[in-house]
Image (tube, grey):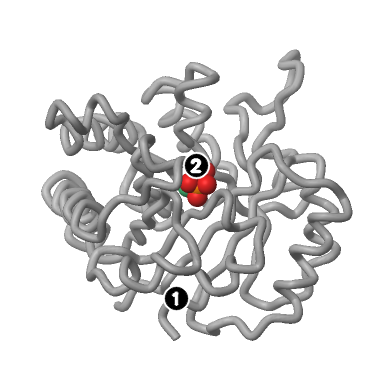
């Protein structure tokens, strides 16, 4: 079964009512490749606004994070059930900013991912190495460690709710995109790991996105690689070139 190309837009802590409406108007009016699944992740405060403004079939709204307790005294957090109650079906988890700035360990990310899936969400699960880890030759070992923590929590069917985003930390928001070869190498290693440690079906069916300074210019070459099934886009998802990234294969 061919993997459907997937493009996620992570707005991070950016945007206002006006700017988010303008981005969504752009998506509603654009000609989007019908063979691409698109998910946009505005800040939590604007999830409802995004849902009500979005008229484009094939485009969904995602949270950027979720907590793994059902309810209770967790000031500032949002639960899986609350997202579902609000009609949200996706969340990003394990973004490197959550891992590095908010101390989320591999185990915390894995536990949140399991809770999200059990509660009915699909997850854009992020992994990736720091510059130091790459320079010391540990890229694949780091990603495999992150995957192993995830796999320890998931059972077979859970993987169908996961899209993996490989995002080298040194490429996020820096303008320094991984070369096509660097990205493909890690994507291939992820797929190989899934084949060896989960199953052939999961290795064949799981979408593996690249994230890190993707823009309207570099997306086309990256999209041609056999193990790159789409993108997770930060900065450029706030700009009109997001449409060009969605349409990378046209
Ligand atoms: C991201 O935040 O997931 C990301 C890839 O950011 P950027 O595209 O801005 O590098």
Give the image location of residue 111, x and y in percent.
45, 28
Could you give the CA–CA distance between mark 2 and mark 1, rounded to whole angstroms? 20 Å
Residue 248: numbered disc: 1
Toward the right, the furthest residue is 18
Asked which quadrant contains residue 73, the reply is top right
Label 1 crowding class (10 Å Cα cut-off): few <14, some 14-19, many 20+? many
Give the structural element (helix, strand or loop) at label 1.
loop
Taking 3 as reference, is 40 left or right?
Answer: right
Q: Under 8 Å from ligand 1: the CB of mark 1? A: no
Q: Are marks 2 and 1 in contact (CB under 8 Å)?
A: no
Label 2 crowding class (10 Å Cα cut-off): few <14, some 14-19, many 20+? some
Give the image location of residue 11, x and y in percent.
65, 48
Q: Under 8 Å from ligand 1: the CB of mark 2? A: yes
Give the structural element (helix, strand or loop) at label 2.
loop
In front: label 2 or label 1: 2
Q: Which residue is mark 2?
A: 173
Toward the top, the furthest residue is 73
Q: Height in image: 132 above or below 158?
A: above
Identify the residue at horizontal 75%, vertical 21% (top origin): 76
- 162 or 81, nearer to the observer: 162
Taking 178 as reference, is 95 left or right?
Answer: right
Asked which quadrant contains residue 221, the reply is bottom left
Circle nearer the N terminus (2, 1)? 2
Residue 237: numbered disc: none
Taking 40 as reference, is 33 left or right?
Answer: left
Give the image location of residue 159, x and y in percent.
36, 51
Identify the residue at horizontal 45%, vertical 86% (top origin): 250
Q: Can residue 117 be seen in this snapshot?
A: no
Image mark count: 2
């Amino acid at each position: 079964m061919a993997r459907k190309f997937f493009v996620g837009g992570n707005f991070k802590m950016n945007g206002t009512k006006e700017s988010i409406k303008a981005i969504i108007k752009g998506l509603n009016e654009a000609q989007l490749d019908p063979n691409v699944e698109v998910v946009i992740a505005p800040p939590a405060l604007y999830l409802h606004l995004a849902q009500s403004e979005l008229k484009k079939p094939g485009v969904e709204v995602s949270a950027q994070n979720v907590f793994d307790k059902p309810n209770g005294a967790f000031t500032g957090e949002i639960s899986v059930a609350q997202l579902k109650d609000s009609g949200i079906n996706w969340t990003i988890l394990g973004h490197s900013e959550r891992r590095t700035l908010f101390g989320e360990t591999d185990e915390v990310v894995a536990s949140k991912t399991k809770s999200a899936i059990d509660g009915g969400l699909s997850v854009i699960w992020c992994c990736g190495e720091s510059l130091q880890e790459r320079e010391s030759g540990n890229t694949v070992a780091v990603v495999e460690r992150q995957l192993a923590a995830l796999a320890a929590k998931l059972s077979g069917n859970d993987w169908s709710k996961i899209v993996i985003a490989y995002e080298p930390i040194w490429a996020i928001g820096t303008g320094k995109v991984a070369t096509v070869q660097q990205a493909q190498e890690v994507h291939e290693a992820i797929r190989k790991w899934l084949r060896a440690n989960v199953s052939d079906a999961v290795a064949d069916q799981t979408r593996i996105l690249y994230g890190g300074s993707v823009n309207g210019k570099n997306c086309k070459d990256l999209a041609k690689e056999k193990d790159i099934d789409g993108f997770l886009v930060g900065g450029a998802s706030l700009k009109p070139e997001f449409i060009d990234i969605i349409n990378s294969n046209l």
